Amino acid sequence: MNSALPTSVLRSALPFSQREFRDALGQFATGVTIITARSAQGHPVGTTVSSFNALSLTPPLVLWSLGLGANSLPVFRQCSHYAIHVLAASQKPLAELFARKGADRFGHTPHHDSAHGVPLLEGCAAVFECRQRNQHEEGDHLLFVGEVERCEHHAERSPLLYHAGHMHARGLL
């Protein structure tokens, strides 16, 4: 049987695997962020996240998500404030450090505290200090909506990008 539809359209109608889904999502390049907060016991917490988006300009809202199995999830569920750091291209080692389980993330990482006690990393392309506004569980992730109370950016710092499962410090060429 000969179809007038392109192979790509026919293939998209067939069931797909989780690997195929991940590979397709990987074709969307994103920035790399580190989200930080402070636990109820006063410990700094942070994790590398590539699921970050602008949500609204008025009020200023951002959206990010974290897997339900993440070790840091309980802290982010309960905290009142957190910071989203858009990493600069030079910060790839920092992104890798904050992505590793069990790593000492803050021991040798330059940072200072916000007015709300949230660890703020130095040298980032942009930083959004947020108040926890809403959470919504969907699938295997928890979506966080933050209201931006303060932000800064450094246009001279190129962003670190994530594409096809890899971080890129110099574009996608």
Image (spheres, rainbow, N blue to C red):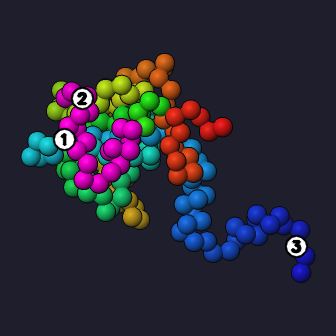
Say which label, 2 or 3, has the lower sequence index: 3
Query: Mark 3 and 1 residues: CB-CB less than 8 Å, in contact?
Result: no
In the image, what residue occupies the spot 39% across and 38% down? 93
**Front in this rendered view, residue 108 or 76:** 108
Query: Mark 2 and 1 residues: CB-CB less than 8 Å, in contact?
Result: yes
Residue 117: where, in percent of width, then height?
Answer: 16, 33
| Number of the front mark, 2 or 3 | 2
Report which residue position mark 3 lands on.
3
Say which label, 2 or 1, has the lower sequence index: 1
Query: Between marks 2 and 1, how big is the CA–CA gap?
Result: 10 Å
**Front in this rendered view, residue 162 or 59:** 162
Report which residue position mark 2 lands on.
111
| The image quarter in which residue 105 lies | top left
| The image quarter in which residue 23 lies | bottom right
Query: Between marks 2 and 3, how big is the CA–CA gap?
Result: 59 Å
| Number of the front mark, 3 or 1 | 1
Residue type at numbered disc 3: Ser
Disc 3 element: loop
Q: Is residue 8 left or right of residue 117?
A: right
Report which residue position mark 1 lands on.
44
In the image, what residue occupies the spot 30% across and 58% down? 70
Please state, as top left, top right, bottom left or bottom right, where the C terminus lies in the image. top right
Please state, as top left, top right, bottom left or bottom right, where the N terminus lies in the image. bottom right
Residue 47: where, in percent of width, then height?
Answer: 32, 46
Residue 88: where, in percent of width, then height?
Answer: 44, 30
